[in-house]
Amino acid sequence: MRSSCDRLQEALLQCHRRMPEGQARRSGCRHLNKALAECVVGEACPEEYEAVRSFCSSGGTSLKRKQCEEAQFSLSLCLSGHQRDFEQQP
């Protein structure tokens, strides 16, 4: 992860330390959790992530919905490739 993701990860850890476990923590830290997830995915698969953001941001024509599905599939493949690489590390 790069520094922007590192900062988000630290902020999420701090949120977890401050908030009691349970619904309050889930609600209070949700925005940081989402931001960190988006940061990590965007760093791992930047082109695929941007395609999903672009094509899936709102409703639209059947063509745009098809492009959204294709972008989501490409992102899934990219993330799966990173997962395999990670699992094969010694």
Image (cartoon, rainbow, N blue to C red):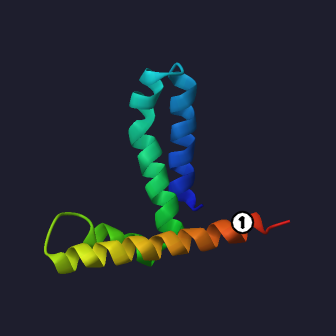
Q: Report which residue position mark 1 lands on.
A: 86
Nearer the observer, 2 or 16:
16
Crowd class of label 1 (few under 14; some 14 to 19; many from 20; radius 10 Å)? few
In the rendered structure, the answer to whether residue 66 lies left or right of residue 15 reads left
Residue 44 in the image: above or below residue 8: below
The kind of residue tagged 1 is Phe
Query: Where, quadrant-wise, is the N terminus in this rendering?
Result: bottom right
Local SS, label 1: helix
Residue at the far right: name it: 90
- Residue positioned 57% across, 36% down in the render: 13
In the rendered structure, the answer to whether residue 89 lies left or right of residue 82 reads right
Residue 16 in the image: above or below residue 70: above
Residue 55 in the image: above or below residue 40: below
Residue 82 image point, x, y percent: 63, 70
Residue at the far left: name it: 61
In the rendered structure, the answer to whether residue 58 lies left or right of residue 67 reads left
Query: Where, quadrant-wise, is the C terminus in this rendering?
Result: bottom right
Residue 19 image point, x, y percent: 50, 22
In the rendered structure, the answer to whether residue 51 lies left or right of residue 29 reads left
Residue 76 image point, x, y percent: 49, 69
Residue 48 in the image: above or below residue 56: below
- Residue positioned 41% across, 37% down in the render: 30
- Residue positioned 55% across, 32% down in the render: 14
Residue at the far top: name it: 20
